[in-house]
Amino acid sequence: MSAGVTRIGLLGCGTVGGAVVRALSRNGDTIARASGHRLEMGPILVRDVSRPRPGVDPSLLTDDPARVLDDPGVAMVVEVMGGLDPALDYLRRALEAGKPVVTANKQLLSREGPRLLEIAERSGTELRFEASACAAIPVIKVLRESLLAAEIQAVTGIVNGTTNYMLTEMARAGLSYDDALAQAQELGYAEPDPTEDVNGADAAAKMAILASIAFHARVPFDAVPYEGIDTLTAEDVGLAAELGFVVKLLGIARLVNGSVTVRVHPTLVPEGHRLAAVSGADNAVLLESDTAGEIMLLGPGAGGPETASAIVADILSILGTHRGSFLHNALADAGRPVLPPAEVTSAFYLRLSVADRPGVLANVASIFGEEQLSIRTVVQKGEGDGARLVLVLHPGVEGRLLSAVGRVAALAEVRDRPVVLRVLGSGDDG
C-alpha cells in the first residue's frame, strides 16, 4: 500500500526547526511504513532567506507567512519560532483555517493555551504541544492519555536543564554561580541571555502547562509564583549538603483541599529522594496518583534533536487521531481554583547572619514560635564577632513564614537579609 503525502508547513528554522527538517528527511521511509503517511516538508518561514541552513532546501524558505498559512497544500503547521508575537496570530490563523498545529512554544501555551484550544475545538482540528514542556520526555502524552483517569495528586519536576546543570556543578565542584553559568554557556546548555532559565520563568511556563493538564484546571503563567537560582550562593549549596540535602530548582504542583497550587523555586531535596540523583542537564518529572502510585519520567529536556523527536511524535499522533476525539481537549476545565501562595504549607531552610551575642537565637526562636512555626534543626557557625545561623523549620504556612522572616530581619542583631529556601518532603509542597 502506498503512503499518502502530507505536507508540513514550518514556522521558524533555528536549532529546533532545522532538526525537525532533518528528522523528517532521515526517518521518512520508516514513518511512511509505520503510519501510512509520507511527510513532505512544505514552505518554511524564516526571517532571512539568504542565510544558509545545513540540510534545508533553500527553495522552501520564505519570509512571507501567507506562503505557509494560506497554502491549501499545507495540511499541518509546525511552530518553533517562539515568543508571543507574531506566533499567536499565526497559530490562530492556522487553527481557524482547520489546519492542525504542533508547537514547542511554552510561553505561548502557558498564556494563551485555553484560547487556542477553544479555536481548535470550534474548527474541529488538533493542537499538540508535547515539545513545550520537557522536549523528548513524553510527560504531556502520559498525562493526556495514559493517566487521564488516574486523578493526579502532584507533579514535581526538574524541568529546566540549564539550572540543573549549574546546580550540579555548584554542588560537585564547588563552583560559584557565575562560574557555573559560564561553564553552562560554554557547553551550550545555557543561552547567551539565560535570564528566563535562571530566574525561573522558563520552568514556570512549563509547570503552568503541566498543572493545567494534570489537574484539568486553568493555570495561566501569571498564576505561578516563581523564584530562580540567580540569587543562590555556593555557601547555601554547601550548607544544604552538610544537612543532608541537594539543592534543585523544582516546579511543584499539587492538589490541596480541592484547590491547585503551582510554584517554582530552589528547593532542598533530601539526598535519598529520587529527584536528588537527577544530575547534569537532564529533566525529570515525578507524577503522584492515588491509583497509579509514583511514576517518574527522566531524560533530556532540551536540545534540537530531542525537541524535534517530540514534535514528530505529535505530528504522527495527529495523523492517527480521529478528529473531534477527547484528545484535542487537553485543558478541559474542572473549575478548580488556584490556592493563594500565602496559604501553601511547606518546610523551610533559613540562613541568618547575626551578631555573636547572647540571646540572639532565643529572640529568633521566640518570633517563630509566635508565628506558630517550630524549628527542627539549628546549626551555628562563628565568624569573628558574628555568626551564621542555619535553621530548618517544620512545615508551616508560608504567609506566617514570610511574616516571621520580616520580623527577624528587623532585629538589630541580624546583619543581612535572611536567605529562605523551601524543603521538599514535608507539608503540602513536598
Image (cartoon, rainbow, N blue to C red):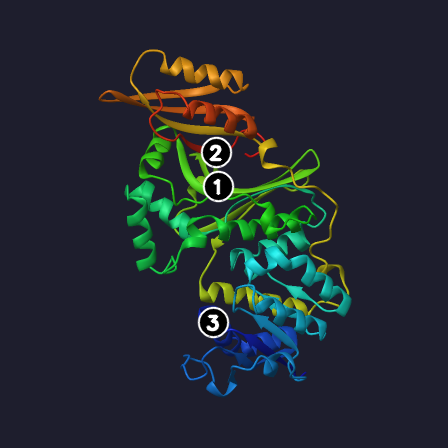
Q: Position of residue 205 (x, y in %)?
A: 55, 52
Task: State the residue in front, 175 or 69.
Answer: 69
Q: Is residue 415 left or right of residue 42?
A: left
* Quarter that holds the N terminus: bottom right
Q: Earlier in the sequence, mark 2 or mark 3?
A: 3
Which quadrant holds the C terminus? top right
Residue 78's place in the image compared with 131, above or below, is below
Rendering coords of residue 215 (x, y %): 67, 46
Residue in front for this viewpoint, 344 or 413: 413
**Secondary structure found at label 3:** helix
The disc label shown at residue 19, or none: 3
Mark 2 to mark 3 CA distance (whole Å): 38 Å
Q: Position of residue 92 (x, y in %)?
A: 66, 69
Earlier in the chain: of badge 1 and badge 2, it is: 1
Q: Name the residue type under label 3.
A: Ala
Question: What residue is at 47 percent from the left and 29 percent from the top?
Answer: 348
Quadrant in the picture for residue 48: bottom left
* Numbered label attached to residue 40: none
Whether label 1 touches label 2, CB < 8 Å: yes
* C-alpha distance separating marks 1 and 2: 8 Å
Secondary structure beneath disc 2?
strand
Q: Residues under labels 3 and 1: Cα distance?
A: 31 Å
Q: Looking at the image, is 158 positioned above or below residue 100?
A: above
Residue for point 44% across, 48% down: 199
The residue sitting at 30% across, 14% down in the picture is 357
Identity of the amino acid at label 1?
His
Identify residue for label 1: 265
**Residue at mark 2:** 422
